[in-house]
Image (cartoon, coloured by chain):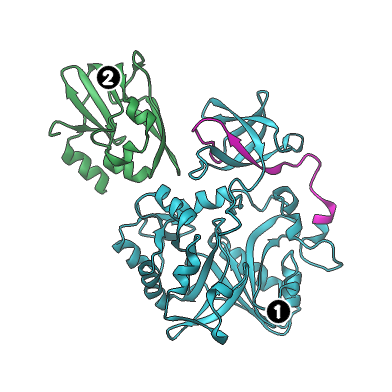
Amino acid sequence: MNDLRYTEDHEWVAVDGDVATIGITAHAADKLGDVVYVDLPIAGVRVTAGKVVGEIESTKSVGELFAPVDGEVLERNEAVVEDPSLVNADPMGAAWLIKVRFTDLPALLSADDYDELTRA
Amino acid sequence: MSDNSSRPSPLDDVHVAAGAAFTDFAGWRMPVRYASDLAEHETVRTAAGVFDLSHMAEFLIGGTHAAAFLDFALGGRASAIAPGRAKYALLLAEDGGILDDVVVYRLDEHRYWVVANASNREVVAAALSERRADFDVAVDDETDRCALIAVQGPDAVAVVSAITGLVLGDLAVVSGIPYYGVAAGDYGETPVLVARTGYTGEDGFELYLDADAAPALWRDLVDAGAVPCGLAARDTLRLEAGMPLYGHELSRDTLPVQAGLHRVVALGEPRAFVGRAALEAGPVAGARLLVGITGEGKRAARAGYRVLREGSEVGEVTSGALSPSLGIPIALAYVDPDVSEIGTELSLDVRGTVIPARVAPLPFYSRKASS
């Protein structure tokens, strides 16, 4: 977990070779409240950094999932689609959302940078 | 998360200690949830939840003309409320638009307690003050000194009965207070109003008392088994119960008949009240009507989303959520009269995705008669 990077859109990114695993942060899950529905792109979809690729709905609001990288979706987490409450139970682990094979890795926030962002 | 400029509730320290997440509601910093809004919702449907509603506005109306004054100032006959009973009522503008929806409690012959929405406190205060000119009546805004704690759910009677420090006058018991009834009592040395009202579709009580004594009563209620619940759960509970929320279903531009509230307004009697002429004239032809809508799947339509019929816009959603109790998307919406019949097939535009839906009877959820 030491290699996690973060975005200003409250996603975490774990990089392994040219594959990025993406989820939303505990802070974001907390802010959303109980997640009741997730809409995630299927394998093969091309995504562009900064563009909306999915939605995370709670009882109170709708959160958008932004692609942190350019690339192609390899896999989405079907367990989360089946049981969206996983996002609240384990946002930084079991509730990863998508894996993307990226072509370019933009500059992302460190854990300290992200901490500072959410404390503000 | 919390806005430092918003006003804290008298229970703020208690909420902070309980780990609440806060939201700004009508200028107040109020708990939106403690841990899980779904769990809090479920608790109210199956056990008992406790809510801090100290942001609500309270007015004490007293004087020999109190009944006649409220008959004139509100659409709805306050004079017909028996002492110890309560009624839902509307405050109307001259043009029939809804300025606020309120609960009117008759405390005794010449005293009423009127509870208004936090967002409308100033509007209600101004309207009551303006309308009292010809009446011998005093209107006191009690909001600043008054806390409101609601205990809601099938176990509410047991929880409130367990508070040994709470004693009703005439040795009455809380279980003896009828639905939409109110009794005066004391919590220790502090006077309290115990009302059998609420906004969740469940049995329960609303307790009005001095802000200073509120934290102790809150702790007693939690010790007696009530689970702290935030405004997020309150919103899904009232939506399932088909209850309108001012600013969503009700507004300055809504006539009572459009919101299905014509029965709340006493037009049948020859009595002058503010807004009467406009209500008799009725809304313009084709004015939209409030309906319940259920959708398919799991995606909820939310306030502002379009309601469609064969691709054309026929209405707009005012509140919506995935119903925690029913597991389906539910919404309240204003639609054209010709598509307002129960069962009418419609669809909802959920951020570009069209979801099949239909007009459904209200409430979406009603508690079992036994509870």
Q: Would you say residue B145 is visible in this rendering?
A: no
Assign the C terminus of chain B to one quadrant of the image: bottom right
Label 2 vs label 1: CA separation?
69 Å
Circle 2 residues within 10 Å: few <14, some 14–19, many ≥20: many
* Chain the render paints green: A
Q: Is residue B289 magenta?
A: yes
Element under disc 1: helix
Q: Is residue B330 left or right of residue A119?
A: right
- Give the letter of the chain under mark 2: A
Residue A109 visible to the viewer: yes
Vertical comparison of B71 with A99: above or below = below
Circle 2: element type: strand
Tag 1: amino acid: Ala
Residue B237 counted in the magenta span:
no
Q: Colour of chain B?
A: cyan
Residue B300 place in picture, x, y as percent: 51, 36
Secondary structure, magenta segment, majority class: loop
Residue B260 x, y percent position in the rendering: 72, 50
Asked whether disc 2 touches disc 1, contact meaning CB atoms under 8 Å apart, the reply is no
Q: Quadrant of residue B349?
A: top right
Which span is picked out in magenta?
A: B279-303
Give the camera-side residue of A85 and B210. A85
- Say if B214 sits above or below B280 in the image: below
**Would you name the residue on which mark 2 appears?**
A100
Residues behind callouts 2 and 1 on a single chain: no
Q: Residue B34 lies in what quarter of the image?
A: bottom left
Q: Position of residue B292 (x, y in %)?
A: 64, 42
Q: Which residue is at a point 14% across and 31% down the rendered structure image?
A: A3
- Residue B66 disc label: 1
